[in-house]
Image: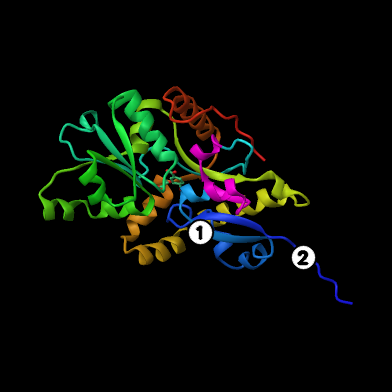
Amino acid sequence: MTLHCEVSLLRIAAINFLNPAPLMWDFEHEPVQRELNTRYAINYTSPALCAERLREGSADIGLIPVAAYAMDPSLAIVPGCTIASLDHIRSILLVVRCSDGPEAARTVALDTSSRTSATYTKILFRKYWNPQAEFLPHAPNLEEMLARADAALLIGDPALYALADREARQQRTGECLHYLDLGHEWRSRTGLPWVSAFWGVRTEALAGKSTALLVDDFQQSRDHGLAHIPELVAEWSAKMSLPAAVVEEYLTRNIHYVLDDPCLAGLELFYRYAAECSALPVTPSLRLL
Ligand SMILES: C=C(O[C@@H]1C=C(C(=O)O)C=C[C@H]1O)C(=O)O
Protein backbone atom coordinates (compact mmCIF):
# COMPACT_ATOMS: atom_id res chain seq x y z
CA MET A 1 0.00 0.00 0.00
CA THR A 2 1.32 3.45 -0.88
CA LEU A 3 0.72 6.21 1.62
CA HIS A 4 0.02 9.58 0.05
CA CYS A 5 1.03 12.28 2.43
CA GLU A 6 -0.13 15.52 0.83
CA VAL A 7 1.29 18.68 2.30
CA SER A 8 -0.58 21.73 1.10
CA LEU A 9 1.64 24.59 0.03
CA LEU A 10 0.82 28.13 1.10
CA ARG A 11 0.31 30.19 -2.05
CA ILE A 12 2.21 33.47 -2.08
CA ALA A 13 1.29 36.42 -4.32
CA ALA A 14 4.49 38.45 -4.72
CA ILE A 15 5.40 41.58 -6.67
CA ASN A 16 7.68 41.56 -9.70
CA PHE A 17 9.33 44.96 -8.96
CA LEU A 18 12.87 45.56 -7.74
CA ASN A 19 11.80 46.93 -4.33
CA PRO A 20 10.65 43.61 -2.75
CA ALA A 21 13.83 41.75 -3.86
CA PRO A 22 15.46 41.74 -0.37
CA LEU A 23 12.26 40.35 1.20
CA MET A 24 12.26 37.58 -1.39
CA TRP A 25 15.89 36.47 -0.95
CA ASP A 26 15.37 32.99 0.61
CA PHE A 27 12.44 32.28 -1.69
CA GLU A 28 14.65 32.88 -4.72
CA HIS A 29 18.12 31.72 -3.61
CA GLU A 30 19.71 28.57 -2.23
CA PRO A 31 20.46 27.21 0.33
CA VAL A 32 17.04 28.00 1.88
CA GLN A 33 14.96 28.12 -1.33
CA ARG A 34 14.76 24.30 -1.58
CA GLU A 35 13.27 24.02 1.91
CA LEU A 36 10.83 26.91 1.36
CA ASN A 37 9.65 25.19 -1.82
CA THR A 38 8.26 22.44 0.42
CA ARG A 39 6.04 24.99 2.21
CA TYR A 40 5.26 27.75 -0.31
CA ALA A 41 4.41 28.27 -3.98
CA ILE A 42 5.06 31.75 -5.39
CA ASN A 43 3.27 33.68 -8.10
CA TYR A 44 4.36 37.14 -9.22
CA THR A 45 1.95 39.94 -10.08
CA SER A 46 1.30 43.68 -9.56
CA PRO A 47 0.65 45.15 -6.07
CA ALA A 48 -3.05 45.77 -6.82
CA LEU A 49 -3.50 42.19 -8.04
CA CYS A 50 -1.74 40.73 -4.96
CA ALA A 51 -4.57 42.11 -2.85
CA GLU A 52 -7.14 40.87 -5.37
CA ARG A 53 -5.68 37.31 -5.25
CA LEU A 54 -6.07 37.22 -1.46
CA ARG A 55 -9.59 38.58 -1.66
CA GLU A 56 -10.72 35.99 -4.19
CA GLY A 57 -8.90 33.19 -2.27
CA SER A 58 -6.44 32.26 -5.04
CA ALA A 59 -3.51 33.20 -2.75
CA ASP A 60 -2.96 32.72 1.00
CA ILE A 61 -0.19 35.25 1.62
CA GLY A 62 0.37 38.41 -0.39
CA LEU A 63 2.63 41.44 -0.38
CA ILE A 64 -0.39 43.71 -0.27
CA PRO A 65 -0.69 47.48 -0.56
CA VAL A 66 -1.52 48.77 2.92
CA ALA A 67 -4.54 50.54 1.40
CA ALA A 68 -6.00 47.16 0.42
CA TYR A 69 -5.85 46.05 4.06
CA ALA A 70 -8.53 48.63 4.89
CA MET A 71 -10.85 46.79 2.46
CA ASP A 72 -10.21 43.41 4.11
CA PRO A 73 -9.18 43.82 7.77
CA SER A 74 -9.89 40.10 8.39
CA LEU A 75 -6.36 39.53 7.08
CA ALA A 76 -3.46 39.23 9.52
CA ILE A 77 -0.11 40.95 9.01
CA VAL A 78 3.30 39.26 9.19
CA PRO A 79 5.16 41.36 11.81
CA GLY A 80 8.49 42.96 11.02
CA CYS A 81 8.50 43.05 7.20
CA THR A 82 7.45 45.95 5.02
CA ILE A 83 8.10 48.06 1.95
CA ALA A 84 8.38 51.54 3.41
CA SER A 85 10.51 54.66 3.20
CA LEU A 86 11.81 57.08 5.80
CA ASP A 87 12.05 59.99 3.37
CA HIS A 88 12.95 60.01 -0.37
CA ILE A 89 11.58 56.80 -1.88
CA ARG A 90 12.63 57.36 -5.53
CA SER A 91 10.04 54.99 -7.07
CA ILE A 92 6.84 56.81 -6.09
CA LEU A 93 6.68 59.79 -8.35
CA LEU A 94 4.15 62.43 -9.15
CA VAL A 95 5.13 63.88 -12.52
CA VAL A 96 3.47 67.26 -13.02
CA ARG A 97 3.01 69.01 -16.37
CA CYS A 98 2.07 72.45 -15.06
CA SER A 99 4.89 74.86 -14.37
CA ASP A 100 2.90 76.02 -11.33
CA GLY A 101 3.36 72.73 -9.49
CA PRO A 102 0.79 70.27 -8.09
CA GLU A 103 -1.48 73.07 -6.77
CA ALA A 104 -2.34 73.90 -10.40
CA ALA A 105 -3.03 70.27 -11.42
CA ARG A 106 -6.73 69.70 -11.96
CA THR A 107 -6.55 66.12 -13.23
CA VAL A 108 -4.28 63.34 -11.99
CA ALA A 109 -3.74 59.98 -13.71
CA LEU A 110 -3.17 57.20 -11.14
CA ASP A 111 -1.11 54.10 -11.97
CA THR A 112 -3.56 51.18 -11.95
CA SER A 113 -0.96 48.85 -10.38
CA SER A 114 -1.08 50.96 -7.19
CA ARG A 115 -3.52 51.01 -4.31
CA THR A 116 -1.45 52.60 -1.55
CA SER A 117 0.33 55.37 -3.47
CA ALA A 118 -2.94 56.21 -5.24
CA THR A 119 -4.47 56.76 -1.78
CA TYR A 120 -1.51 58.82 -0.49
CA THR A 121 -1.80 60.94 -3.65
CA LYS A 122 -5.48 61.63 -2.96
CA ILE A 123 -4.59 62.59 0.64
CA LEU A 124 -1.82 64.97 -0.49
CA PHE A 125 -4.12 66.66 -3.00
CA ARG A 126 -7.12 66.86 -0.67
CA LYS A 127 -5.16 68.15 2.32
CA TYR A 128 -2.38 70.23 0.81
CA TRP A 129 -2.44 70.86 -2.94
CA ASN A 130 -5.82 71.04 -4.59
CA PRO A 131 -8.92 69.51 -2.94
CA GLN A 132 -10.83 69.83 -6.24
CA ALA A 133 -8.40 67.66 -8.24
CA GLU A 134 -9.98 64.78 -10.16
CA PHE A 135 -8.41 61.35 -10.44
CA LEU A 136 -8.47 58.87 -13.30
CA PRO A 137 -7.02 55.35 -13.30
CA HIS A 138 -4.45 54.72 -16.02
CA ALA A 139 -1.92 52.06 -17.04
CA PRO A 140 1.65 53.16 -16.18
CA ASN A 141 2.65 54.96 -19.38
CA LEU A 142 3.91 58.47 -18.70
CA GLU A 143 3.28 59.94 -22.16
CA GLU A 144 -0.29 58.63 -22.36
CA MET A 145 -1.01 59.70 -18.78
CA LEU A 146 0.21 63.25 -19.42
CA ALA A 147 -1.79 63.40 -22.64
CA ARG A 148 -4.94 62.88 -20.53
CA ALA A 149 -4.11 64.60 -17.25
CA ASP A 150 -2.06 67.42 -15.72
CA ALA A 151 -0.14 65.03 -13.46
CA ALA A 152 0.73 61.33 -13.37
CA LEU A 153 1.44 58.97 -10.48
CA LEU A 154 3.95 56.23 -11.31
CA ILE A 155 5.18 53.53 -8.91
CA GLY A 156 7.81 50.80 -8.86
CA ASP A 157 10.00 49.97 -11.84
CA PRO A 158 8.12 52.23 -14.32
CA ALA A 159 8.86 55.16 -11.96
CA LEU A 160 12.55 54.22 -11.76
CA TYR A 161 12.73 54.13 -15.57
CA ALA A 162 10.91 57.48 -15.89
CA LEU A 163 13.39 59.08 -13.50
CA ALA A 164 16.36 57.58 -15.38
CA ASP A 165 14.91 59.03 -18.63
CA ARG A 166 14.25 62.49 -17.15
CA GLU A 167 17.04 64.47 -18.85
CA ALA A 168 16.79 62.62 -22.16
CA ARG A 169 13.06 63.28 -22.19
CA GLN A 170 13.55 66.97 -21.63
CA GLN A 171 15.99 67.08 -24.54
CA ARG A 172 13.63 65.09 -26.76
CA THR A 173 10.54 67.16 -26.04
CA GLY A 174 11.79 70.51 -24.71
CA GLU A 175 9.11 70.15 -22.04
CA CYS A 176 10.00 70.84 -18.41
CA LEU A 177 8.21 68.56 -15.98
CA HIS A 178 8.23 68.53 -12.17
CA TYR A 179 9.16 65.15 -10.61
CA LEU A 180 7.93 65.02 -7.01
CA ASP A 181 9.12 62.24 -4.71
CA LEU A 182 5.95 61.50 -2.75
CA GLY A 183 7.80 59.79 0.13
CA HIS A 184 9.59 63.06 0.72
CA GLU A 185 6.41 65.14 0.32
CA TRP A 186 4.70 62.98 2.97
CA ARG A 187 7.68 63.01 5.35
CA SER A 188 8.12 66.76 5.19
CA ARG A 189 4.45 67.33 6.10
CA THR A 190 3.92 64.60 8.71
CA GLY A 191 7.39 63.76 10.05
CA LEU A 192 6.52 60.08 9.62
CA PRO A 193 7.56 57.20 7.32
CA TRP A 194 5.63 56.31 4.20
CA VAL A 195 4.45 52.68 4.34
CA SER A 196 3.56 51.00 1.05
CA ALA A 197 3.05 47.31 1.67
CA PHE A 198 3.27 44.42 4.10
CA TRP A 199 2.65 40.67 3.96
CA GLY A 200 -1.07 40.00 4.48
CA VAL A 201 -2.22 36.47 5.41
CA ARG A 202 -5.61 34.73 5.17
CA THR A 203 -5.67 33.19 8.63
CA GLU A 204 -7.97 30.32 7.52
CA ALA A 205 -5.08 29.09 5.37
CA LEU A 206 -2.91 28.65 8.46
CA ALA A 207 -5.02 25.83 9.99
CA GLY A 208 -2.63 23.03 10.99
CA LYS A 209 0.45 25.16 10.19
CA SER A 210 2.95 26.79 12.49
CA THR A 211 2.51 30.56 12.64
CA ALA A 212 5.91 30.91 14.35
CA LEU A 213 7.60 29.05 11.48
CA LEU A 214 5.87 31.26 8.90
CA VAL A 215 6.93 34.46 10.67
CA ASP A 216 10.50 33.11 10.93
CA ASP A 217 10.57 32.21 7.24
CA PHE A 218 9.59 35.72 6.16
CA GLN A 219 11.73 37.61 8.69
CA GLN A 220 14.80 35.47 7.97
CA SER A 221 14.33 35.94 4.24
CA ARG A 222 14.34 39.73 4.81
CA ASP A 223 17.47 39.50 7.00
CA HIS A 224 19.29 37.31 4.48
CA GLY A 225 18.28 39.68 1.67
CA LEU A 226 19.64 42.68 3.57
CA ALA A 227 22.87 40.72 4.13
CA HIS A 228 23.23 40.13 0.36
CA ILE A 229 22.76 43.63 -1.05
CA PRO A 230 25.88 43.47 -3.30
CA GLU A 231 24.56 40.33 -5.04
CA LEU A 232 21.11 41.92 -5.44
CA VAL A 233 22.67 45.09 -6.88
CA ALA A 234 24.65 43.07 -9.44
CA GLU A 235 21.60 40.97 -10.37
CA TRP A 236 19.09 43.82 -10.68
CA SER A 237 21.26 46.53 -12.22
CA ALA A 238 22.01 44.09 -15.07
CA LYS A 239 18.36 43.02 -15.35
CA MET A 240 17.02 46.61 -15.37
CA SER A 241 19.94 48.35 -17.13
CA LEU A 242 20.17 50.85 -14.27
CA PRO A 243 23.47 52.07 -12.76
CA ALA A 244 24.63 49.88 -9.85
CA ALA A 245 24.93 52.97 -7.61
CA VAL A 246 21.24 53.81 -8.18
CA VAL A 247 20.09 50.27 -7.37
CA GLU A 248 22.30 50.19 -4.28
CA GLU A 249 20.99 53.51 -3.00
CA TYR A 250 17.44 52.40 -3.70
CA LEU A 251 17.78 49.14 -1.75
CA THR A 252 19.79 50.58 1.15
CA ARG A 253 18.58 54.17 1.62
CA ASN A 254 15.30 54.71 -0.22
CA ILE A 255 13.41 51.58 0.76
CA HIS A 256 13.10 50.59 4.42
CA TYR A 257 12.27 46.94 5.09
CA VAL A 258 11.56 46.78 8.84
CA LEU A 259 8.00 47.31 10.05
CA ASP A 260 9.03 49.17 13.23
CA ASP A 261 7.24 51.58 15.59
CA PRO A 262 7.77 54.71 13.44
CA CYS A 263 6.29 52.80 10.46
CA LEU A 264 3.30 51.73 12.57
CA ALA A 265 2.77 55.39 13.56
CA GLY A 266 3.00 56.39 9.88
CA LEU A 267 0.45 53.73 9.02
CA GLU A 268 -2.01 54.90 11.69
CA LEU A 269 -1.83 58.45 10.35
CA PHE A 270 -2.21 57.25 6.75
CA TYR A 271 -5.39 55.34 7.63
CA ARG A 272 -6.78 58.28 9.63
CA TYR A 273 -6.14 60.81 6.87
CA ALA A 274 -7.46 58.42 4.20
CA ALA A 275 -10.75 58.03 6.11
CA GLU A 276 -10.97 61.82 6.68
CA CYS A 277 -10.51 62.40 2.93
CA SER A 278 -12.97 59.57 2.05
CA ALA A 279 -10.13 57.89 0.15
CA LEU A 280 -10.63 54.68 2.19
CA PRO A 281 -13.82 53.52 3.91
CA VAL A 282 -12.54 52.67 7.41
CA THR A 283 -9.60 53.05 9.75
CA PRO A 284 -8.65 49.40 10.33
CA SER A 285 -6.90 48.18 13.46
CA LEU A 286 -3.65 46.40 12.76
CA ARG A 287 -3.83 42.65 13.38
CA LEU A 288 -0.30 41.29 13.58
CA LEU A 289 0.29 37.50 13.55
C1 LIG B 1 7.79 51.52 -3.01
C2 LIG B 1 6.89 50.95 -3.76
O1 LIG B 1 5.92 50.24 -3.11
C3 LIG B 1 4.86 49.53 -3.73
C4 LIG B 1 3.69 50.40 -3.85
C5 LIG B 1 2.42 49.91 -3.70
C6 LIG B 1 1.20 50.75 -4.00
O2 LIG B 1 1.33 51.94 -4.32
O3 LIG B 1 0.07 50.22 -3.93
C7 LIG B 1 2.25 48.59 -3.26
C8 LIG B 1 3.30 47.77 -2.99
C9 LIG B 1 4.69 48.27 -2.92
O4 LIG B 1 5.63 47.32 -3.33
C10 LIG B 1 6.93 51.06 -5.23
O5 LIG B 1 6.45 50.16 -5.91
O6 LIG B 1 7.54 52.01 -5.72
Q: How far across and down, in percent of the image, does residue 17 sit?
A: 43, 55
Q: How far across and down, in percent of the image, does residue 27 sit?
A: 58, 61
Indicate yes or no whether the magenta region holds residue 155. no
Disc 1 target residue: 44
Q: Is residue 150 above or below residue 284?
A: below
- Quarter of the picture containing the N terminus is bottom right
Is residue 123 left or right of 49 when viewed as pictured?
left
For the point 75% across and 63% down, the residue is 7
Q: How is the image coloured?
A: rainbow
Q: Give the image quarter of residue 149.
A: top left
> Residue 283 or 257: which is nearer the viewer?
283
Q: Is residue 103 above or below residue 225?
A: above
Q: Magenta stretch?
A: 51-71
For the point 22% across and 51% down, the residue is 143
> Residue 59 or 228: which is nearer the viewer?
59
CA separation in Å, label 2 and label 1: 24 Å
Numbered circle sitting on residue 155: none
Q: Is residue 258 visible?
A: yes
Q: Amino acid at mark 1?
A: Tyr
Label 1 sits on a secondary structure element that is: strand
Q: Earlier in the sequence, mark 2 or mark 1?
A: 2
> Residue 108 or 15: which is nearer the viewer?
108
Is residue 130 left or right of 113 when viewed as pictured?
left
Category of crowding for the residue at label 2, using alpha-carbon neighbours closer than 10 angstroms: few (below 14), some (14–19), many (at least 20) = few
Q: Amino acid at mark 2?
A: Glu
For the point 35% across and 29% down, the residue is 124
Q: Is residue 212 visible?
A: no
Disc 2 target residue: 6
- Quarter of the picture containing the C terminus is top right
